[in-house]
Image (spheres, grey):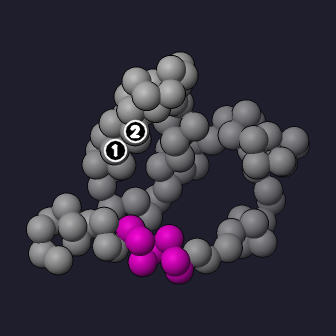
């Protein structure tokens, strides 16, 4: 499942990267992959169940949300590389 959060700078770039990765996994691992894209705010119950929340979305998102600055730094590096300015 690919979740596109509301802070994603370019959803098309992310979706394209995931599609490329899926093709590589299928080719080299012989696995069959199915990716479902979910937009922030439109998460089905199955999304929350994958995260261990069997009753659905939490009432308070702030309690569920946790900053991941290392991921933000990785994303910035990737976007810089894509733009060719690193």
Q: Residue at x 84, y 48 (%)?
A: 53
The residue tagged with tag 2: helix, strand or loop? helix
Which residue position is annotated with label 2? 21
Which quadrant is home to the N terminus? top right
Q: Is residue 57 magenta?
A: no
Q: Which residues are magenta?
A: 69-75
- Location of residue 35 with respect to 11 vertically, above or below: above
The local crowd at label 2, few if under 14, some if 14 to 19, many if 20 or more residues have their Cα within 10 Å, is few
Residue 71 position, x and y percent, is 50, 71
Which residue position is annotated with label 1? 17
Q: Are marks 1 and 2 in contact (CB under 8 Å)?
A: yes
Is 79 on the left or on the right of 41, as rendered?
left
- Give the total of numbered labels: 2
Measured Cα–Cα span from mark 1 to mark 2: 6 Å
The residue tagged with tag 1: helix, strand or loop? helix
- Is there any visible trace of residue 31 in the rendered image? yes
- Location of residue 52 with respect to 80 vertically, above or below: above
């Amino acid at each position: 499942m690919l979740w596109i959060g509301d802070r994603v700078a370019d959803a098309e770039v992310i979706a394209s990267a995931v599609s490329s990765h899926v093709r590589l996994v299928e080719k080299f691992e012989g696995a069959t992959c199915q990716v479902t894209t979910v937009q922030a705010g439109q998460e089905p119950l199955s999304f929350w169940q994958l995260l261990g929340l069997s009753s659905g979305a939490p009432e308070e998102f702030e309690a569920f949300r946790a900053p991941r600055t290392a991921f933000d730094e990785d994303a910035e590096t990737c976007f810089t590389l894509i733009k060719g300015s690193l």
